[in-house]
Amino acid sequence: MARTVIDGAYIATVDGSSTEHATGYIVIRDARIEAVAAGRAPSDVVDGAREVIRGDGLLATPGLVNTHHHLYQWLTRGYAQDAILFDWLVSLYPAWSRIDADLVGDGALGAMAVLARSGCTTVADHHYVFPRGGGDIVGSIVDAAQTLGLRLHATRGSMDLGASDGGLPPDFAVETTAAALEASADAVHRYDDHSFDSMVRVAIAPCSPFSVTTELLRESAALARDLGVRLHTHGAETVEEEAFCRERFGMSPTDYLESVGWLDEDVWMAHCVHLSAGDIARFAASGTGVAHCPSSNARLAAGIAPVRDMLRAGVPVGLGVDGSASNESGQLGSEIRAAILAARLRDGADALAGRDALRVATMGGARVLGRQEQIGSIEPGKLADLALWRIDGVEHAGIADPVAALTLGAMPPLSRLIVQGETVVEDGDLVRVDAGEVARGVSRASRALADRL
Ligand SMILES: [Zn+2]
């Protein structure tokens, strides 16, 4: 059996006791972590290893988990630069409704390449635009993840509430309720793998209260529970969404989503910026997860999510980049610092500690995706998804605390990204694909999409 040893790194395990080793070693056997311990690796561990990675100058953390993204938006960055959510959506729907499986594949490769190079090992994607004749879009996202070697939680999203029925999206961008449900079930049957070391899971994800019907929310919940997969949507993102729900349904977004069966431990929602204390208590009691997307919320001036209060109440919280059209950076590693800064601007210096932010980005995300037994921490028996950050360069050398180098400093260069025991990024470069090729593909696809308008 193939054994890899990481020897002499600073290790932040993010286990239940927040164990850290100033000098430690990690043993990987095939796809799993076999051991993690303090000190230098003993010679009998090193002997016969397929590879020994020198850990000096490196910080080892669990691979980061991205809990919310729209990978296809990689092709529509730089538009509607100064708009709030609803205006931004309305200006982008025409472009998005002209995508197809080939274009989405190019965009997904670009978006996931950048995620991988910023420490992300598991990607949750929320895809909700399915133009007629657009081909197998979920399939092209799965292919892109497999090409790069990343773990994927694909969600089959949907919109069925067009403008003529009082929704936000134009009628040409939506599907029928029946078509959306049928395609969601089909995506689960085709691509969902529920094994322990699954590289692809599928969830069902109607887009938002202002773009889907009540029927689709209810039926999607029933379908997901029937199929044993998770549920995802956007919730409580902006004050305009709150006004929409109060006017149309006579209640807040959280009350509305609860009324259709969407507060439960198999659900995670993006944003949750505008939650009351009572909402937070209900999220905690039900185990409903939150994908916190600080940069996107700032870009669209949506507000700052109450992360301090959610964590204190026990709400499962993970980190998300969100779609690249509202977060052109697309990096997950730098969202850790963004989360810390945003939380402190909102709630003060003790709102979010660096190590708590690292936990949100790893174990928090794993819990939100229902993968806490398999990923999110460096512990024997878990899958070997690891990020090795170089912290001895000029940006980080001398920072008193290696974890602060990652959480408060500039995002460190990535020495290695390991997924399922295999190296995916080495010295900042993608191992399985040529980054220049990916970039050229993104340029071509972005131009092709713009030309369709
Ligand atoms: Zn989103």
Image: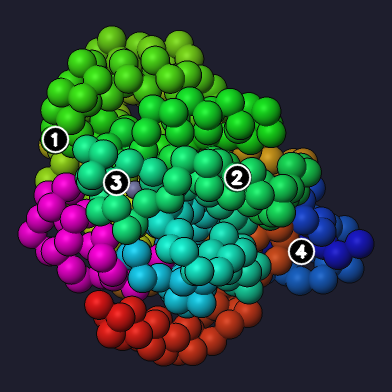
| Observer able to see residue 246 | yes
* Span highlighted in magenta in the image: 72-95
Residue that badge 3 annotates: 162
Q: Secondary structure at mark 3?
A: loop
Above or below, comparing residue 75 to residue 38 in the picture = below
Along the viewing direction, whichever of 203 and 421 lies nearer the viewer: 203
Q: Nearer the viewer, mark 1 or mark 4?
A: 1
Kind of residue sitting beneath label 4:
Thr
| Residue that lies at the very extreme toward the front in this rendered image | 164
For marks 1 and 4, give the CA distance. Answer: 51 Å
Above or below, 167 against 23 in this view is: above
Considering the numbered disc 2 on the image, is that residue within a helix, a strand or a loop? helix
For this rendering, which residue is in front, 42 or 19? 19
Q: Which residue is mark 1?
A: 240
Say if mark 1 contacts mark 4, CB within 8 Å: no
Circle 1: residue type? Glu
Residue at x-position 65% and y-position 60% = 419
Query: Which tag, 1 or 4, sits closer to the chain's start?
Result: 4
Residue at mark 4: 4
Disc 3/disc 4 C-alpha distance (Å): 53 Å
| Mark before the other along the chain sequence, 2 or 1 | 2
The one of 347 and 72 positioned closer to us in this rendering: 72
Question: Alpha-carbon distance for marks 1 and 3?
Answer: 17 Å
- Between label 3 and label 4, give the one nearer the viewer: 3
Label 4, secondary structure: give it: strand
Looking at the rendered structure, the kind of residue marked 2 is Glu
Distance, label 2 to label 1, CA atoms, is 31 Å
Residue labelled with disc 2: 182
